[in-house]
Image (spheres, coloured by chain):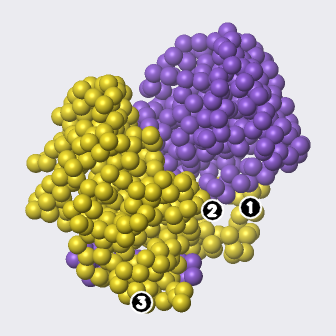
Chain colours: A yellow, B purple
């Protein structure tokens, strides 16, 4: 019953089998051969899924907002999948606490699928595994895919950035907007959410954000700033509406197509870099360069010169350093 | 007068010419051809320099401690160079504020050399440029090289870790030790300094550190915990003594040689990865793969399949993914 056959798993998952979907995501996460084939099948399948990245500092209320958004989307009758990204977590596949907390509200709803992802040996890491998983969710029929990051590390920001629409969550209070800016969140935001808007400092945070937006070179689209109290589900409808509006704008303006192209290029680059790095490291670790590495250790050849030598041996001889 | 000839610069710098030394460090920082040659010359030169990495959260007093250590070292009659590492700074070469502040105390002392480093186009980034610069300082005669990081980002921790001796600075107060642990500083510390020890909470911080050390798998060396008030130069002599003791231990135990080997291997890997990534990206950006990339953009080939294809074209055909 527990097959790893990509074609079969894919068909079963498209017919609504959640166990097959979970298996697909595990295989993709692991970066296995089957995962690669599943990634190919997902890419080739037609899909009209809309991906939303939600990011912001820990404690800003991303999970609560996500949960409220899921409810809102479900009220409109659409299905929704959530990928919770935690690069530092050794767990995945629904094992982490956050999932269980989030699941409580939606555990009995077959139209909601929630899944945690961490690095599990995928060669390109999460920044390749997540788009692959996201496409798989779209291919098996989820029209809405929410990618929620736990923190605002570099990988997480990259991942959130590559959704169709990116939501940045901040809290009221002086300095939060500045922190968001520092973390590189200003450039990637399509929508700002000031969550916990029942606290003091909303006006200041909004003013900071507006000022930073004023200083940014915006095109025809200016990210809206929406106040929410996710805990009480206030403002969530407005966030969903803003998401739809941005998506609409992105499609009609061509921004969606440009982004899609750019993110595929990035994905390609990441896979290539990871694959080549792995090959070089493997050869370096083998007996092939044992003599040269010993020479470096005893000080008779420096790392840069050895690097040139290794690259020469591997047949990579183009000029590699700036002149 | 302003030569870029590596051999000449190197000779001049060894004869004490600070302008040539500054030029050498700029060329290394930039990762230029001359920088590579200078790096080779430095590596080949005999040197008995001792490098100390000083890291810790911003505001913990690293700069003040460094300045006090410089003074202490000078009192012993030895020369000392300081590399201040700030990955996020667009400035370098002595331009940043920190330098000017630090310089005040030592500006007239020719036995002290202070220099900021930031990324300036070096292919391998700071984590390759810093060891190269550090070796250059050793090669031109500095017996003591202090590498001080501004923050505790990943790159900065990596850099501090690769010194002969790594000093981690924390402040008194509940939680600071825990933060240090989170930032990955516990594993890299050879010496802990509780700076600003005139504040409350020293005992708690010491207890936290001791507890974390107890939980760590230590060998025959246990990192000492030293209290300082760097501002008043209190405890600084003890820090210097602990640095010398650790260095002594590292040499006699073989730890120094093991570390040196490991860090050269890391450096080699970083250079190789950066060089290869650059080559692949350059070829990918050329017209060579224009058709394939267009096919990916219009959805007829997925990134992984295209990656395989590109690797095939580049003559890299070994199995690249885990099975």
Judge by depth and name the residue closer to the eye, B263 or B242. Answer: B242
Q: Which mark is residue A295?
A: 1
Q: Residues within 10 Å of mark 1 (few under 14, many from 20)?
A: some
Lateral position of residue B164 relative to residue A93, left or right: right
Query: What residue sits 15% from the left and 54% below the top?
Result: A245
Residue B314, visible in the rendered structure: no
Q: Chain of mark 1?
A: A
- Mark sitting earlier along the chain (2/1): 1
Q: Chain of mark 3?
A: A
Judge by depth and name the residue closer to the eye, B32 or B238. Answer: B238
**Element under disc 1:** helix
**Element under disc 3:** helix
Separation of residues labelled 3 and 2 (CA atoms) = 46 Å
Judge whether A291 appears above or below A248 on screen: below
Please report contact status of discs 2 and 1: CB closer than 8 Å, yes or no. yes
Mark 3 vs mark 2: in front: 3
Judge whether A180 appears above or below B39 on screen: above
Lateral position of residue A48 relative to residue A157, left or right: left
- Mark sitting earlier along the chain (3/2): 3
Residue B257, visible in the rendered structure: yes
Judge by depth and name the residue closer to the eye, B236 or B273. Answer: B236
Please report contact status of discs 3 and 2: CB closer than 8 Å, yes or no. no
The residue where tag 3 is placed is A7
Separation of residues labelled 3 and 1 (CA atoms) = 50 Å
Q: Chain of mark 2?
A: A
Q: So how many labels did they put on this image?
A: 3
Query: What residue sits 48% from the left and 39% below the top?
Result: B87
Judge whether A9 appears above or below B92 on screen: below
Q: Position of residue B11 (x, y in %)?
A: 62, 37
Residues marked 2 and 1, same chain: yes
Q: Which mark is residue A306?
A: 2
């Amino acid at each position: 019953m527990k097959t790893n056959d990509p074609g079969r798993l894919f068909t079963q998952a498209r017919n609504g089998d959640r166990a097959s979907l979970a298996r697909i995501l595990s295989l993709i996460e692991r970066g296995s051969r089957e995962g690669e084939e599943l990634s190919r099948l997902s890419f080739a399948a037609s899909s009209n899924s809309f991906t939303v990245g939600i990011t912001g500092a820990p404690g800003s209320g991303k999970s609560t907002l996500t949960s409220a958004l899921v409810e809102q989307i479900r009220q409109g009758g659409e299905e929704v999948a959530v990928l919770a990204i935690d690069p530092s977590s050794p767990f995945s596949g629904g094992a982490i606490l956050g999932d269980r907390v989030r699941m409580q509200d939606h555990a009995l709803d077959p139209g909601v699928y929630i899944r945690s992802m961490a690095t599990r040996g995928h060669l390109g890491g999460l920044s390749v595994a997540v788009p692959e998983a996201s496409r798989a969710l779209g291919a098996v029929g989820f029209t809405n895919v929410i990618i929620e990051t736990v923190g605002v590390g570099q990988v997480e920001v990259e991942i959130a950035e590559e959704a169709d629409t990116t939501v940045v969550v901040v809290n009221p209070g002086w300095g939060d907007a500045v922190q968001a800016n520092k973390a590189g969140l200003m450039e990637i935001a399509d929508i700002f959410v000031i969550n916990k808007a029942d606290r003091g400092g909303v006006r200041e945070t909004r003013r900071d954000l507006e000022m930073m937006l004023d200083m940014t070179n915006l095109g025809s689209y200016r990210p809206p700033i929406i106040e929410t109290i996710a805990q009480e589900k206030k403002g969530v409808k407005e966030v969903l509406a803003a998401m739809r509006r941005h998506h609409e704008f992105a499609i009609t303006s061509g921004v969606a197509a440009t982004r899609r192209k750019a993110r595929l290029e990035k994905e390609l680059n990441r896979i290539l870099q990871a694959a080549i790095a792995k090959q070089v490291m493997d050869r370096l670790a083998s007996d092939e360069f044992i003599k040269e590495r010993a020479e470096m250790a005893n000080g008779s050849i420096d790392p840069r010169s050895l690097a040139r030598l290794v690259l020469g041996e591997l047949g990579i001889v183009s000029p590699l350093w700036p002149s």
